[in-house]
Image: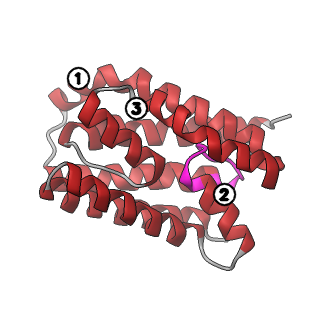
Amino acid sequence: MLSTQKIIVILFGSLLIACGIDFFLVPFKVLDGGLIGIALIINYLFKIKIGTLMIIASLPILILTWIQLRKMFYSSLLGMVISSFLIDLLEPFQYYFLYYVELTPFTSSVLGGFLLGAGIGIMLRYEVSTGGTDLLAQIMSMRSFMNVGIIIFVSDAVIISLGGLLLSMETFILSILTVTAGGIATSICTMK
């Protein structure tokens, strides 16, 4: 059974992730890495809901978690469902946020990356994830001495490079800022 503390962490981390995506990245078509980045690329190209895509793409990683790291499975399943739900729930509020808050693409990329990284890092610190590559990175980190933030940073770099080819050079450059800010925030939040 999940503790009250873990449920609060899941809700708070998921809210940070949803705000980072919906209010900072999507308006400027900026990418993050990992499964979130893949979901964003598909959303930008085909207009499919980001949260729904995250659930579909996370299923193989959740199966691996069931096999390799069962103690994180239930909380990660809940983290994935709540973060995906909040991303799709907050999406209609982008207009209102952008109406009252004026951001440059640079500022939006950095703030969005930091919010995403902080949300993921806070959740990982309490052995919870959104079921994406951050969970896979957590499994890899436990099997090696690499910091989970570094593993996420490398996988994110691969995803945004592919996204840069499909979208634009501006998206690629802004996404580098997002991934860098996110990697820093995740590393800070997961330090012991």
Can the viewer see residue 178? no
Q: Residue 41, how many percent across, how many down?
A: 31, 42
The amino acid type, in three-letter code, at marker 1 is Tyr
Picture coordinates of residue 111 (x, y %)? 31, 52
Point out residue 130 in the picture as x, y percentages from the top left corner: 58, 43
- Disc number at residue 125? 2
Count of numbered circles in the view: 3
The tag earlier along the polypeptide, 1 or 2, is: 1
Amino acid type, callout 2:
Arg
Which mark, residue 50?
A: 3
- Residue 24, percent from left and from top: 28, 42
Nearer to us in this view, 35 or 190 = 35
**Residue visible at 47% across and 47% down in the picture:** 35
73 sits to left or right of 112? right
Residue to which mark 1 is pinned? 96
Is 22 located above or below residue 135 in the figure?
above
Q: Which mark is residue 128?
A: none
Label 2 secondary element: helix
Asked if residue 116 is among those painted magenta in the image, a careful observer would answer: no
At 54% from the left edge and 33% from the top edge, which residue is drawn?
56
Q: Nearer the viewer, mark 2 or mark 3?
A: 3
Q: CA distance from mark 1 to mark 2?
A: 32 Å
Magenta residue check for 128: yes
Judge the density around disc 1: few (<14), some (14-19), many (≥20) Cα neighbours within 10 Å. Answer: few
Horizontal relation, residue 69 to residue 19: left or right: right
Task: Mark 2: give few (<14), some (14-19) or many (20+) Cα within 10 Å.
Answer: some
Say which of marks 3 and 1 sits in front. 3
At horizontal 62% and vertical 49% (from top left) the residue drawn is 123
Give the CA separation, mark 2 to mark 3. Answer: 24 Å
Question: What type is the residue that disc 3 sits on?
Answer: Ile
